[in-house]
Amino acid sequence: MSACYSVFGDAMSYKVDKFSLFQAEDNPTAQEISTTYTELTGSKCEIKSINQSPKILYKYTFLASTIWFNGSNYNIHFLHVKLQKSNDNFSSNIVDVPNCLFNISSDTQASADALWKTCTPMFVLENFDSKYLRLVARSYSTSNKARLHTSYHYDGQVNPGNIYYNPSLIVMEL
Amino acid sequence: MSHLLNKIIKNPKTVVTTHTSAQETLNSGNTSEVLTGSEITYTPAQGSSKVVYEISFYCEKLNGSTLKGFYLEEYASSSWSEIDTKYRRNFGNIGTNSQRWYIHFRFVLPAWTGSKQLRLTVSSHSGGSSFTLNQMTEWDGSSATNKFCNTNLLVYSI
């Protein structure tokens, strides 16, 4: 870190900038996640750090719920979720971040158990070497699809509409 | 000359633990063990009022029940002890089903002076309540043996 002086030769205060980002999706369209990896709405960000190899905190939150058809006819969800990085906004350079992955599932044994689950992935990335981050997810099988960001049930009603869990993202250079 | 660090949180400290094997929790009721990757020695930033302890980890229970209690501990007077019952957490499932969780806990503590060791312990509510930490037994639509999730710990002052 170099010293900084005013035109009068006095030492000055200055800031050591650290990148931070706070974003939320407002009433997003529901995502139905099947067996193809799909970017989670609002999970993508560009890292605009001025520092080489920064340490990055990535924290996202979203709702995953059972897909309900009718009566006791549910699609029991089972998702694989992983963090990816890229240097070209995921155009051609797409790399899975090692060991930043997890499963979430509801009951995969019974046929009619439903689950509504919020999830808050938090990853610390040492010596980050890319420009972009995002989360992607797929289901274990076509019988284990999940619905994200909205709920079929609320306040005692079935399919009341306009019930959102807005996914939000915090990314911060530490 | 002064340096004003343009950060929202103060004195962040992290521990990222990469796993190569699963941590199987104890099966007996009311016996506790340390959650791997949860221990840290931390000194709050000068002038701060709170310390935030955040941890994330993966766990799963296949074909059975589990109910786990988590306790935030500090090292003081040559031993570990629970900080306060208000920092307890628990979760679980019942039946013969399978559940997979990605857990994120946040604890907000009053700041202290000097360094302090913190950690998280986990215990079963009753016998037969073990579960598996850090390793996923399925991935990309089939069984897996080499998929692990890092445990991420972040502690900072505000």
Image (cartoon, coloured by chain):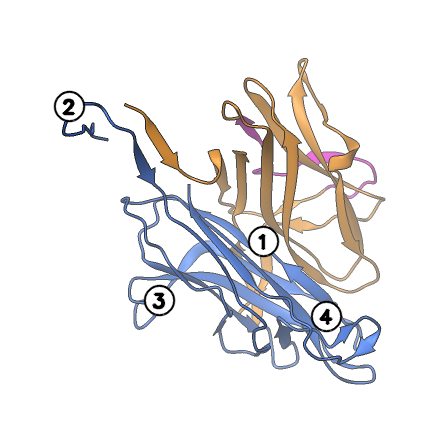
Chain colours: A blue, B orange
Discs 1 and 3 lie in a common subunit: no
Q: Residue at x 24, y 31 (%)?
A: A1
Q: Provide the residue designation for mark 4.
A: A108
Label 3 packing within 10 angstroms: few (<14), some (14-19), many (20+): some
Q: Is residue B120 left or right of residue A159?
A: left
Q: In this view, does A98 lie to the left or right of B114?
A: left
| Quadrant in the picture for residue B105 | top right
Q: Residue B4 carries which label?
A: none
Q: What element carries label 2?
A: loop
Q: Determine the chain carrying the residue at label 3.
A: A
CA gap between label 1 and label 4 equals 18 Å
Type of amino acid under label 3: Ile
Residue B110 percent coordinates (x, y): 65, 28
Q: Provide the residue designation for mark 1.
A: B135
Type of amino acid under label 4: Thr
Specify start and end residues of the magenta stretch as a single range.
B26-43
Type of amino acid under label 1: Gln
Type of amino acid under label 2: Gly
Residue A118 percent coordinates (x, y): 66, 61
Q: Do the residues labelled 1 and 4 touch (CB within 8 Å)?
A: no
CA gap between label 1 and label 3 equals 24 Å
Question: Closer to the camera: disc 3 or disc 4?
Answer: 3
Q: Determine the chain carrying the residue at label 1.
A: B
Q: Provide the residue designation for mark 3.
A: A94
Q: Determine the chain carrying the residue at label 2.
A: A
Question: Closer to the camera: disc 2 or disc 4?
Answer: 2
Q: Residue A9 carries which label?
A: 2
Answer with mark 3 or mark 4, whichever residue precedes in sequence: 3
Q: Is mark 3 on a helix, strand or loop?
A: loop
